[in-house]
Image (cartoon, rainbow, N blue to C red):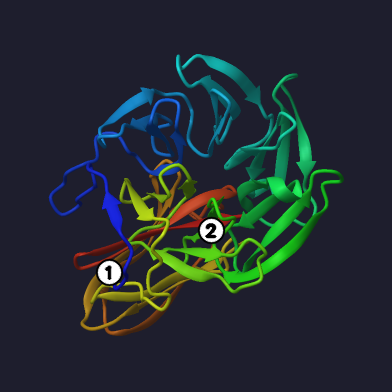
Amino acid sequence: MKTMKIIIVLLFMVVYSTGLYCQYLNNPESVVYDSLNSRYLVSNWGSGNIVQIDSTGTQSIWLSNAQCFAGLHIRDSVIYTACREYGVKGFNLNTGENVLDIDISGATNINDITSDNSGNLYVSYPTGDAIYKINIATEQSWLFADSGLDVPNGLYFDEPNNRLLVVSYRTNSPIQEISLIDSIASVVTYTGKHNLDGLTRDAEGNYYFSSWQSNRVYRINSTFSNSPEVFSTHNDDPADIYFDIENNLLVVPLFFTHQIEFVSGTIVGSFMDQIEESDELKNVYNYPNPFNPSTTISFDVAQTSSFVTLGIYNIKSQKVKTLVNDVLPVREYSIIWDGRDSDGNQVSSGIYFYKLKAGNFEKTKKMILLK
């Protein structure tokens, strides 16, 4: 990447060409800094484990098989976790004891999590176009907002304005606010960016959001008066980003390469830097996303005829269908997936991935089927 940013890449990076596998990070989704114990804690979509990374960069499993697949949020001495198909759990940071266990009945994709100053948690439910609220003291949960939302994903509590901010995993996602008084959703600003995942803020009040479509993290000022500027560019899909104010670092989980990147909060790269693409393939994306009932996966075979495979996978990494398995000449391609498996059966709504391979190049991206 042609950028001035400083990146510290942790060990255990997946190296597909040699078959080396990351020992602990497994589709890292969310990360937070535990200042009480001077460590980062990382949730893992692929395993449900919470991995800790100490001040020396050493990784170990802090909680095993805890169903902690998605968002993480620290409040006081407890880390609260979004457990995807279950609900929300809370664990004491010092002992690991399970101190909160909330089953959100019917929810199948609980994703991000944050809290307000009144003892309430908020969790996003992208495939249900909803946000749930949980009172920590009473351990009661209820539907907080489900109007005016479209695949809500990343959440952040804006304390100065006492509101919830939301970004969504969809085309042209705005940044929305939700009033904590009446749950009404409204647009704060239009980003012009697609498939947004994480949302965070630095000590100066600047906001950052991540895009799976562009593999970039963007920065926007505290008043949302400027256009989003490219803050960092990554080789993989940046998930639920986190700003470590204590160490002035933007922390970026890279979902498919099983690694974490740290970007200095004081250094902004060239805003016009370009994403590096392979010699074999370019312009890989699908539209619409989310979709119902079909989506078109587009890509360019750029330089020479290549043997290309394109497969659809579910969240358990099981292949659903092969769309392409052939030598393709140089040109642009648009391949339609109609939401059916290899037997012609309509698949259920939820998160799916498409994996594109050509020569030594491999690209995996996320898409959501809504019904």
Question: In which quadrant is the N terminus drawn?
Answer: bottom left
Seen from the viewer's position, the closer of residues 203 and 50 is 203
Going by the image, does 131 lie left or right of 6?
right
Q: Residues within 10 Å of mark 1 (few under 14, many from 20)?
A: many
Where is 238 relative to 316, above or below? below
Type of the residue with mark 2: Phe
Q: Element under label 1?
A: strand
Residue at the spot 33% in from the left edge and 26% down from the top edge: 61
Instruction: Find numbered disc 2 in the image and state the secondary structure of the residue it sits on.
Output: strand
Marks 1 and 2 in Cβ contact (< 8 Å): no
Label placed on residue 209:
2
The residue at 72%/63% (across/down) is 188
| Percent of width and height locating residue 98 | 53, 16
What residue does disc 1 label?
308
Identify whether 213 is placed above or below 95.
Answer: below
Nearer to us: label 1 or label 2: 2
Task: Tell me how far mark 1 sits from mark 2, CA to CA.
Answer: 32 Å
Q: Which residue reaches farthest right? A: 182
Front in this rendered view, residue 67 or 123: 123
Using a 10 Å C-alpha cutoff, classify the residue at mark 2 as few (fewer than 14 neighbours), some (14 to 19) or many (20 or more).
Answer: many
Where's residue 103, x and y in %? 65, 25
Amino acid bearing label 1: Val
Q: Residue at x 19, y 50 (%)?
A: 15
> At x 54% / y 61%, what residue is drawn?
195
